[in-house]
Image: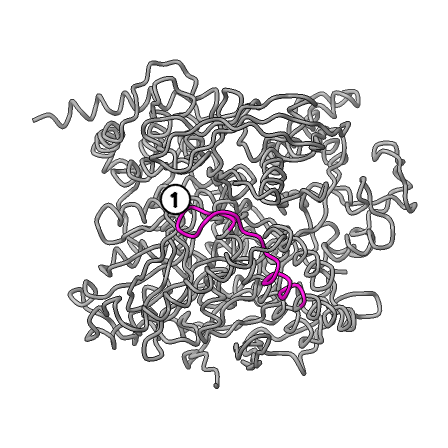
């Protein structure tokens, strides 16, 4: 593949803290290699800003290999940028061309308050997990792993759901700011497995209740979440969660 | 100070059982009064915090990420070893123990490794019970694959995301304890010092990375589960935030550092493409099952890989190591790649890469598929297409990752790969109970030095992290806390907390007040270059001495010309990084001193002065069969203490893969 360099204009959301108002700042970066990752381009910009005595841009990132779920930029109107099934850290500059203007914002959701610039607080996801995203088994209680055969089809489907990285792109992409894809992925994983059966009903009820409490919006089946999910988590999980929720609601009514 | 590893007496395979049978216990009512601090929430930290919370202790857990689920254990790809013998292929606790001691080139402690092998099977049971979706066969039972350095199939896996699935399992257990009120979680917090009272670890000073303020936290004991220090090289497969700071602060408070120079350099990573490079990405060891590694036979050959005819290719691993071929252990494969590139046979624009080629595997699988479908007369193109489908099913996610990063299609062109820093076997010295040389201070997982000797085998890091957290610390910590049940929680107004906080605060102020011209990043890059060039894959006395001088000079420059933007009492990622790089600089010097002292080659540590006639690593058991445990004495001043290694069961021999 041909390597090339480019000059770009960046419009980046700057916000000092949760309480302060924010606005877009415009920056110029020069000689950006098509081989760089998007975050490496931000590294170059930040080095430039620090050297000029200006405030660098705060953004979340850690593993830079698409698995930790920390990076969270909304680029040109798309969660994680223009490539599909991709995180920002894996987006490379060959997706852009010389002279482009790129607009970068944080995840926008009432349930994800901005901490600074492009960083948001996704603590709501942890609290939803605390409400029921687990199997209650203390260390030392387990039986032999192979005493519980699991249909490969179910095991594979559970794995697909479990591959969610908790980045929040589904919420950011959703016009309603719904967290249904995230919550349903965990509900599905555990509902598909025999180990998850004892708490199957309480789990879905509690997780959904917490989700609502956190201020996430409703699902109106636009499927933007699936389209922008870096791990390709399927909306069929949402359908499964709706069924689980209905069943649980009916059976627990007194 | 003399080192007591506290290895229980008795036969190797009875030590752990005997220990557990006689260890002191803490009754449930007393557990509720005991507070434990856990720093780091990767596999070791999350499993420890969850298990201790379940037992009834009051736990406080800390991580610098925005959620405990993001710790870098999440990025482990290949798998986790366990001596289950589900494949009926002769595996046993003894074999796993033996392979690990041998794979570590006889520089690990036998008793610890044996315990690791003993608890390995229970880890798989625990993870399955939590709902970890391991790969399964059609009959519904668990699937295994093989990894380097073993002759059995004992690796459990979840596609190429085993670390993610195991961590999410431990994370879910941790979140459950948080909901139950047994664990208090501090996200976006970084530990900046240990607080010691009467010689015992009694708490930490941490910084709230969002608000910027310092906090004091008391604990009857402190557990460091803070991972490895590969980022001392700047470029590594570690996450950007992975750092040595917690372990280094502990070291400066009296915890000895064990074998700091033992670094694992992984042979198959995507090569550096330019100066802007911020991290390196691993391509799983499993690829070497099917990929063949080669370079052109001609120096500076600038033809495209596909234009170089078969007879002009040098499959150097197959040539040098006919018995193991492309599946030699990581240390051997890495050195062989470096040797070819140093000699001028490297490929790509930087000439620091070799090819990992799937062409033969694609044809081989294609022919098998054609045979299966009764299509023996298929033409070459059909065979290749069929073969590609098979390779895609086995390694698709890795091939996709390679294409995203390089923009090249590895189904058509061989991958370019080069070795990169991946894991550190060295770490805080701990005894059999995982306690450091500071009373009440423990180190778990990659943060300690104990189980992998001079070279870690693939799929053993996940095993060790979870063994320490789920099955070792819940027993050994009780043995210490049983004597502490009368100690009431110490208020953080105690002068020791006051003093520790002031020390941390002064250092932050000092960093901010340098007001120089150079950025943190630029210093980190320079440190990384010194370390990689002189304390990397090959080391010699002259280079290491030079490195020590260069690092000392870099340290001076850092403390006189560093530029940090922003303020102290606010979110300031540059300030966070500055503190970490300052510690990496000091660690780098110690690593070079350790490498200089160890005038032998073993595992990942290759001293050019100590090699066989054909360039293989040569151990010196007579003089170096010990753990080098370094004691901090003052600036650039350490004293080395030796823990002699004795091998009762696995007798050291020269490793050979020819």
User: Is A151 or A2 nearer to us in this picture?
Assistant: A2
Q: Quadrant of residue A241?
A: top left
- Residue at x 27%, y 46% (from the top left corner): B176
- Residue at x 54%, y 72% (from the top left corner): B258
Name the image colouring: one colour
User: Is B313 or A56 nearer to us in this picture?
Assistant: A56
- Residue at x 65%, y 59% (from the top left corner): B527
Q: Quadrant of the C terminus of chain A?
A: top left
Q: Residues within 10 Å of mark 1 (few under 14, many from 20)?
A: many
Give the residue pinned by disc 1. B67
Magenta stretch in the rendered image: B553-574
Q: Is residue B114 left or right of residue B205?
A: right
Q: Secondary structure at mark 1?
A: loop
User: Is A101 or B263 nearer to us in this picture?
Assistant: A101
- The answer to whether residue A41 is visible is yes
- In the displayed structure, B508 sits above or below A155; it is below
Q: Please, which residue is most extreme toward the left here?
A: A254
Q: Is residue B609 left or right of residue B27?
A: right
Return the x and y of residue A19 as percentages of the image width and height: 33, 35
- Residue at x 75%, y 43% (from the top left corner): B292
Find out whether residue B566 is within the magenta segment. Answer: yes
User: Is B592 or B476 nearer to us in this picture?
Assistant: B592
Q: Quadrant of residue B202?
A: bottom left
Q: Quadrant of the N terminus of chain A?
A: top right
How many numbered discs sit on the rendered protein? 1
């Amino acid at each position: 593949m041909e390597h090339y360099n480019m000059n770009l204009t960046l419009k980046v959301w700057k916000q000092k803290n949760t309480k302060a108002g924010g606005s877009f700042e415009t920056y110029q970066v020069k000689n950006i290699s098509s081989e760089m990752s998007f975050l490496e381009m931000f590294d170059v910009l930040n080095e430039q800003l620090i050297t000029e005595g200006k405030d660098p841009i705060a953004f979340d990132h850690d593993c830079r290999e698409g698995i930790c779920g920390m990076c969270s930029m909304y680029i040109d109107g798309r969660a994680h940028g223009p490539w599909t099934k991709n995180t920002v850290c894996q987006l490379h500059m060959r997706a852009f061309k010389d002279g482009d203007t790129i607009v970068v914002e944080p995840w926008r959701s009432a349930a994800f308050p901005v901490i600074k610039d492009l960083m948001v607080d996704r603590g709501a996801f942890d609290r939803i997990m605390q409400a029921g995203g687990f199997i209650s088994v203390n260390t030392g209680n387990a039986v032999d792993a192979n005493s519980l055969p699991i249909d490969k089809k179910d095991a594979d489907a559970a794995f697909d759901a479990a591959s969610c990285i908790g980045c929040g792109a589904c919420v950011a992409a959703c016009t309603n700011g719904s967290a249904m894809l995230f919550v349903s992925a965990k509900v599905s994983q555990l509902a598909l497995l025999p180990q998850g059966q004892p708490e199957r009903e309480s789990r879905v009820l509690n997780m959904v209740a917490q989700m609502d409490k956190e201020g996430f919006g409703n699902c109106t089946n636009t499927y933007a979440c699936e389209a922008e999910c870096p791990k390709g988590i399927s909306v069929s999980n949402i359908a499964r969660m709706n069924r689980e929720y209905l069943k649980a609601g009916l059976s627990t009514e007194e | 100070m003399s080192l007591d590893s506290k290895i229980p007496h008795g036969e190797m395979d009875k030590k752990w059982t005997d220990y557990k049978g006689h260890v002191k216990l803490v009754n449930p009512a007393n557990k509720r009064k005991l507070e434990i601090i856990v720093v780091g929430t990767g596999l070791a930290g999350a499993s420890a915090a969850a298990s201790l919370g379940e037992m009834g202790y009051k736990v406080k857990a800390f991580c610098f990420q925005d959620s405990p689920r993001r710790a870098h254990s999440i990025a482990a790809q290949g798998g986790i070893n366990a001596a289950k013998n589900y494949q009926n292929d002769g595996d046993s606790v003894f074999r796993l123990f033996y392979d690990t001691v041998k794979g570590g080139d006889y520089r690990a402690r036998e008793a610890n490794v044996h315990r690791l092998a003993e608890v390995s099977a229970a880890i798989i049971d625990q993870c399955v019970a939590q709902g970890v979706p391991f790969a399964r066969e059609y009959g519904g039972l668990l699937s295994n694959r093989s990894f380097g350095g073993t002759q059995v199939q004992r690796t459990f896996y979840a596609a190429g995301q085993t670390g993610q699935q195991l961590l999410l399992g431990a994370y879910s257990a941790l979140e459950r304890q948080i909901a139950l009120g047994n664990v208090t979680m501090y996200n976006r917090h970084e530990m900046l010092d240990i607080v010691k009272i009467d010689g015992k670890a009694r708490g930490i000073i941490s910084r709230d990375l969002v608000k910027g303020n310092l906090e004091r936290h008391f604990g009857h004991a402190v557990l460091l589960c803070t991972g490895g220090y590969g980022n001392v090289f700047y470029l590594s497969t570690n996450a950007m935030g992975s750092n040595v700071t917690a372990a280094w602060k502990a070291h400066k408070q009296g915890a000895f550092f064990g074998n700091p120079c033992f670094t694992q350099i992984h042979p198959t990573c995507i090569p550096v493409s330019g100066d802007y490079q911020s991290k390196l990405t691993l391509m799983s060891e499993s690829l070497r099952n099917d990929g063949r590694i080669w370079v052109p036979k001609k120096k500076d050959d600038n033809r495209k890989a596909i234009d170089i005819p078969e007879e002009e290719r040098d499959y150097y691993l197959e040539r040098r190591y006919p018995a193991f071929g492309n599946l030699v252990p990581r240390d051997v494969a890495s050195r062989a790649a470096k040797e070819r590139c140093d000699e001028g046979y490297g490929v790509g624009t930087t000439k620091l890469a070799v090819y990992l080629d799937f062409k033969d595997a694609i044809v081989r699988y294609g022919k098998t598929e054609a045979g299966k479908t009764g299509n023996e007369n298929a033409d070459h193109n059909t065979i290749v297409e069929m073969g590609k489908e098979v390779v895609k099913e086995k390694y698709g996610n890795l091939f996709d990752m390679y294409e995203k990063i390089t923009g090249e299609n590895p189904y058509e062109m061989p991958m370019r790969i080069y070795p990169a820093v991946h894991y550190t076997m060295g770490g805080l010295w701990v005894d059999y109970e995982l306690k450091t040389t500071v009373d009440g201070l423990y180190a778990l997982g990659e943060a300690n030095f104990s189980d992998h000797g001079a070279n870690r085998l693939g799929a053993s890091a996940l095993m060790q992290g979870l063994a320490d957290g789920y099955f070792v610390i819940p027993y050994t910590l009780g043995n210490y806390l049983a004597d502490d049940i009368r100690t009431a929680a110490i208020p953080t107004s105690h002068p020791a907390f006051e003093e520790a906080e002031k020390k941390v605060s002064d250092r932050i102020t000092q960093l901010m007040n340098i007001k120089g011209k150079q950025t943190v990043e630029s210093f980190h890059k320079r440190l990384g270059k010194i370390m990689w060039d002189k304390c990397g894959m090959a080391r010699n006395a002259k280079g290491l001495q030079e490195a020590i001088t260069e690092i000392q000079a870099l340290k001076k420059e850092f403390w006189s010309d560093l530029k940090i933007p922003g303020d102290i009492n606010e979110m300031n990622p540059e300030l966070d990084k500055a503190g970490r790089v300052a510690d990496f600089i000091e660690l780098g010097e110690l690593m070079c001193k350790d490498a200089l002292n160890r005038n032998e080659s073993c595992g990942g540590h290759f001293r050019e002065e100590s090699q066989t006639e054909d360039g293989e690593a040569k151990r010196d058991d007579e003089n170096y069969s010990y753990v080098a445990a370094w004691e901090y004495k003052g600036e650039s001043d350490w004293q080395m203490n030796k823990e002699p290694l004795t091998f009762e069961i696995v007798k050291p021999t020269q490793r050979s893969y020819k």
